[in-house]
Image (cartoon, rainbow, N blue to C red):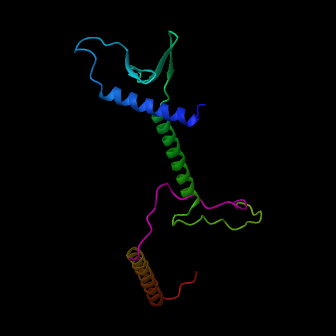
Amino acid sequence: MEHTNGRQGSTARLWLVATLVAVFAPPASAAGEDTGRFSMSPTEGGVIRLDRETGAMSFCAGKDGAWTCKDMPEQESELKKRVEQLEGERRALEAEKRLREGPLGGPVAKAPESGNQPGSPPAGDTLPPAPPGDLPVPNERDVDKLFDYVEGMVKKFKERIDRLEREAKKQPDVPL
């Protein structure tokens, strides 16, 4: 009775042997001599056939004078395709997550409910999505610089109002 695990194990061994033979086998012909499209390497129960043009490998076995070849699975290329697919899905999920989060990493706030007022957005709309890319979170020094800047603006605004009030006191009242 043959088990599936035993077949997979022998296929893996054949794959390993074929790979080692293909990599470490010395060239079969002298330089300048055409070696043909296929390379054959003997293995337990048959031969491994390597297609030199495509890189495809087959296990060939003869029974009662009839030879048959079965393609060996390209597990590595299938795994690479799957990894690329999963990486694409991961990037898409991260982009979706960034769109769902606000600029500081929290959820995007919902707009207040509007009661069918003309020009107001429908109820349940969210704020516009955050711009693409990651925005850095400001540190304490950046916040202090911002407050110093705003404080300077407020001082200038107050000085301007005081100056305008002084100038208005100097001029006689002009009816509007």
Q: Residue furthest top?
A: 65
Along the line of sight, the residue nearer the viewer: 158 or 21: 21
Residue 32, image x, y percentages: 23, 12
Residue 33, image x, y percentages: 25, 11
Q: Is residue 51 left or right of residue 24?
A: right
* 110, above or below 167, in the image: above
Quadrant in which the C terminus is drawn? bottom right
Residue 103, image x, y percentages: 52, 64
At horizontal 22% and vertical 14% (from top left) the residue drawn is 30
Quadrant in which the N terminus is drawn? top right
Q: Write the start and end of the magenta stretch as one range.
A: 120-140
Magenta span has 115?
Answer: no
Q: Quadrant of residue 76?
A: top left
Q: Residue furthest right?
A: 116
At horizontal 56% and vertical 51% (from top left) the residue drawn is 93
Residue 136, image x, y percentages: 43, 64
At horizontal 59% and vertical 65% (from top left) the residue drawn is 107
Along the line of sight, the residue nearer the viewer: 141 or 68: 68
